[in-house]
């Protein structure tokens, strides 16, 4: 028996599997949708952060460019530059550098000679790009590397008259993209920022240990989906810093490479909420699966409970042979399956019909048996009564001799014995048999039965073949002897009635062991045998092929043998004889 052989298990497993698959598919879909949405939001947010950084940087630099052009037009600066005296220009440059808030301010003459530098110490020694062109609108933009960052420089000419420009020199104003600026941009974009160029990171909000991982991103275009920094996963977008109108790339250590900004956001941190979502979905899924499993089991039980009751009753019917078993009554439930209830009701109706049919059949069988018994008894009683009546008529004669009286009395006595035997057989068949158990020697019992059938020692029709090692049985001696006598008598009469009766006609009774403790008795004859049509009826009551038989002999024999726990069987072939086999058990309380 397998787990799928039960309808309850199949319904339960199918329902539970369907629920688990449905919940699992929904869980996977929700997880994928939530994760995809979170990833998309992270990428969009990062792109927006890159755009905001670029716009803010450009706006800031444009502001410095406008301020630089305004300062270059101030008469005071022009007068200082026209003096071509560095000590005169230096104080003016420092004052304007403080007012602009620039990280570097450099003033050069028309030949490119530096007249003044103002700004932090790390920016004072950087190499500046060449002077702007001679056109009044000429403006130069460039990037210059410095210690701890990249300097974004705008250079504007200093002239006397815009209509007839006479270039006095150049004013260069620089905006540093360093760690301080990166921190400002991080606060603005809520992202990690790194500035670099030429395979080198100059400034970043991330620790120095992470810079080697960021270097390959400088040359990457667009978004990099996975960057591992320490124990966290980042997503990065790279934006070039080359401004429109820039006249020169990064110089010095950068090797002339264009600078770029790398904007990073931690996927680990931003998607950490997914763990909570997944955990909540997992707990919900487990709870849903448990509820679905319980509901599946309840549904399976509600469907199969009536079927189980029907199956149990059918199993009892198969075991006991009682086809009238009824299903136990139970209160109807609102969750009970209507089809299963219909099946149970139909089964109950069927068993009720079978019970009614059996009662009717039993009644008909009793009436039929009574009719057949009445016919047999009437026929069997009529003959003896006729003989007794004839004998009594003879006894009424006055001149009857003593010998005739003796014959008449003998006839009456014989017929009375015949009537008694008939009544005894009918009672033995009709009423339950009560056995009296005692140890019995089967060999001795067989010899006794053979002598009862052949009292003349000269008659050798019955041959006895007895095994020497038979066990002693605990059985009813008289009942078993009656069976042996009945079967031997039938065999003897079959041999005598054969048209080929001769010296070779005989009945053989054989005993042998049957298993370790049982005994088998076989009675064979070489009479005419039993026809194939009659073989199936030999144990039926009232069936007989003899004119004077009642048809109860073999039926009574079978009742006795089966009552003793044994079996009786008959095999026969026409013109080849008949064999009757008795299988006798050791009996209650017999030694094994």
Image (spheres, rainbow, N blue to C red):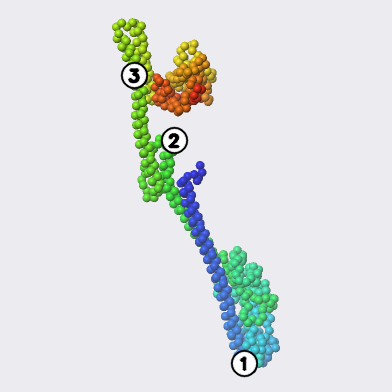
The residue tagged 1 is 162
Against 592, residue 68 (above or below) is below
Against 344, residue 458 (above or below) is above
Disc 3 residue crowd, few under 14, some 14–19, many 20+, Cα 10 Å: few
- Residue that appears at 57% across and 75% down: 51
In the image, 451 versus 123, the foreground residue is 451
Left or right for 523, reference 401 = right
- Residue that appears at 34% across and 8% down: 405
Against 112, residue 330 (above or below) is above
Image disc number at residue 319: 2
Please state which of the two labelled residues, at mark 2 or mark 1, is closer to the viewer.
Answer: 2
Between the C-alphas of marks 2 and 1, the distance is 123 Å
Left or right for 256, reference 521 = right
- Residue 271, image x and y in percent? 54, 65
Image quadrant where residue 368 sits: top left
Disc 2 residue crowd, few under 14, some 14–19, many 20+, Cα 10 Å: few
Q: How many marks?
A: 3
Q: Are marks 2 and 1 in contact (CB under 8 Å)?
A: no
Left or right for 195, reference 15 = right
Image disc number at residue 382: 3
Q: Callout 1: helix, strand or loop?
A: loop
Q: Are marks 1 and 3 in contact (CB under 8 Å)?
A: no
- Which of disc 3 and disc 1 is earlier in sequence? 1
């Amino acid at each position: 028996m397998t787990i799928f052989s039960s309808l309850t298990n199949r319904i339960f497993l199918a329902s539970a599997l369907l629920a688990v698959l449905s919940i699992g598919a929904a869980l996977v879909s929700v997880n994928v949708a939530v994760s995809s949405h979170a990833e998309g939001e992270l990428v969009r947010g990062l792109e927006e952060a890159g755009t905001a950084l670029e716009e803010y940087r450009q706006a800031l630099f444009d502001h410095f460019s406008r301020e630089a052009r305004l300062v270059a037009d101030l008469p005071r600066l022009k007068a200082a530059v026209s003096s071509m005296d560095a000590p005169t220009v230096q104080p003016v440059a420092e004052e304007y550098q403080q007012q602009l808030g620039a990280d570097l301010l450099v003033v050069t003459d028309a030949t490119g000679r530096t007249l003044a530098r103002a700004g932090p110490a790390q920016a004072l020694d950087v190499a500046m790009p060449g002077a702007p062109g001679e056109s009044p609108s000429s403006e130069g933009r460039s990037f210059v590397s410095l210690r701890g960052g990249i300097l974004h420089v705008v250079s504007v000419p200093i002239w006397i008259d815009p209509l007839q420009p006479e270039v006095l020199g150049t004013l260069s104003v620089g905006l540093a993209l360093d760690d301080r600026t990166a921190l400002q941009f991080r606060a603005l974009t809520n992202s990690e920022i790194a500035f670099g160029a030429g395979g080198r990171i100059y400034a970043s909000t991330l620790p120095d240990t992470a810079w080697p991982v960021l270097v390959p991103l400088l040359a990457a275009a667009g978004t990099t989906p996975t960057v591992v920094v320490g124990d966290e996963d980042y997503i990065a977008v790279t934006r070039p810093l080359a401004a429109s109108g820039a006249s020169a790339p990064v110089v010095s250590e950068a090797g002339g490479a264009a600078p770029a900004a790398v904007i990073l956001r931690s996927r680990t941190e931003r998607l950490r909420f997914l763990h909570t979502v997944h955990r909540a979905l997992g707990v919900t899924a487990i709870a849903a699966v448990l509820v679905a499993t319980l509901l599946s089991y309840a549904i399976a039980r509600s469907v199969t409970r009536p079927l189980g009751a029907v199956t149990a009753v059918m199993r009892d019917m198969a075991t006991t042979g009682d086809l009238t078993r009824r299903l136990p009554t139970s209160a109807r439930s609102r969750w009970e399956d209507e089809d299963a209830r219909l099946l149970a009701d139909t089964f109950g109706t069927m068993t009720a019909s079978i019970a009614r049919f059996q009662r009717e059949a039993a009644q008909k069988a009793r009436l039929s048996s009574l009719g057949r018994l009445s016919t047999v008894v009437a026929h069997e009683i009529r003959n003896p009564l006729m003989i007794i009546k004839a004998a009594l008529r003879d006894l009424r004669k006055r001149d009857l001799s003593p010998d005739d009286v003796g014959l008449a009395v003998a006839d009456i006595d014989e017929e009375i014995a015949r009537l008694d035997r008939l009544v005894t057989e009918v009672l033995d068949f009709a009423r339950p048999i009560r056995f009296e158990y005692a140890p019995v020697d089967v060999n001795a019992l067989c010899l006794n039965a053979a002598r009862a059938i052949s009292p003349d020692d000269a008659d050798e029709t019955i041959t006895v073949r007895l095994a020497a090692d038979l066990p002693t049985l605990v059985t009813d001696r008289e009942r078993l002897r009656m069976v042996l006598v009945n079967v031997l008598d039938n065999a003897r009469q079959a041999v005598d009635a054969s048209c080929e009766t001769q010296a070779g006609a005989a009945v053989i009774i054989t005993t042998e062991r049957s298993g370790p403790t049982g005994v088998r008795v076989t009675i064979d004859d070489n009479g005419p045998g039993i026809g194939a049509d009659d073989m199936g009826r030999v144990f039926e009551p009232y069936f007989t092929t003899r004119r004077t038989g009642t048809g109860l002999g073999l039926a009574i024999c079978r009742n006795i043998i089966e009552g003793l726990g044994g079996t009786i069987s008959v095999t026969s072939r026409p013109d080849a004889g008949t064999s009757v086999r008795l299988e006798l058990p050791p009996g209650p309380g017999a030694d094994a």
